[in-house]
Image (tube, rainbow, N blue to C red):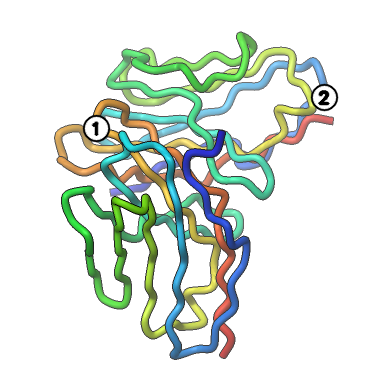
Amino acid sequence: GAGVSQSPRYKVAKRGQDVALRCDPISGHVSLFWYQQALGQGPEFLTYFQNEAQLDKSGLPSDRFFAERPEGSVSTLKIQRTQQEDSAVYLCASILQGSGTYEQYFGPGTRLTVT
Amino acid sequence: DQQVKQNSPSLSVQEGRISILNCDYTNSMFDYFLWYKKYPAEGPTFLISISSIKDKNEDGRFTVFLNKSAKHLSLHIVPSQPGDSAVYFCAASDTGRRALTFGSGTRLQVQP
């Protein structure tokens, strides 16, 4: 089936604006992850859902970051009062629970630029 | 505190030769390791993985070696092809925590 999709692909926000980034995981994938990738760095973990339950949010950098997955499929990452240091690519990944593997399938990412 | 390190930011090899990408880790709780390949403007694509109970895993031209005592793993690509030119990320996970910890990547360029 289709892979992980993310929208928008590019987002420019003025400092102080709120943004919402969407992730559609692979159909049937129970687990969903969000990562932040700064320029020249590897992805860094933000948060993890199993179905609609947010099991780990230890990577969220501040209380301005909020993620939800209310029906256990589509997820939204919201950043309030954006700052320049929030500029990064935000990646979503999903994994089939019970597959016995750890391979996460990534979407193309949303590049956020805060001006 | 970087738990997964890729100390070579870039690597250039000739087509047909072997590419060796290295990765070191510090967290002894990691028990599963993965390599991802990334092209510009795309998300990382899974390449190959290895469990800590093994020391080698092979898939076609790609082989990953794990040395647990040295906390070191490497990815070998033989023979290298121009289409392999990309950024390669090493990642690690532990059973209790599903999140992946990534290195900073190595840009591989395969010269025709």
The residue nearer to you, when weighing B94 against B87, is B94
Circle 1 residues within 10 Å: few <14, some 14–19, many ≥20: few
Q: Nearer the viewer, mark 2 or mark 1?
A: 1
Q: Secondary structure at mark 1?
A: loop
Q: Is residue A20 left or right of residue A23?
A: right
Q: Position of residue B54 (x, y in %)?
A: 18, 56
In the image, what residue occupies the spot 39% across and 24% down?
A48
In the image, what residue occupies the spot 59% across and 78% down?
B12
In which quarter of the view is residue A55 placed?
A: top left
In which quarter of the view is residue A111 placed?
A: top right
Q: Is residue B57 left or right of residue A81?
A: left
Locate the N terminus of chain B and report the quarter of the image it occupies: top right
Amino acid type for the residue under numbered disc 1: Thr
The residue that mark 1 highlights is B95
Q: Which mark is residue A14?
A: 2
Q: Secondary structure at mark 2?
A: loop
The residue nearer to you, when weighing B65 against A26, is B65
Is mark 2 in CB contact (under 8 Å) with mark 1? no
Q: Position of residue A4 (x, y in %)?
A: 40, 42
Q: Position of residue A32 (x, y in %)?
A: 36, 29
Q: Position of residue A103 (x, y in %)?
A: 30, 46
Amino acid type for the residue under numbered disc 2: Lys
In the image, what residue occupies the spot 22% across and 64% down?
B57
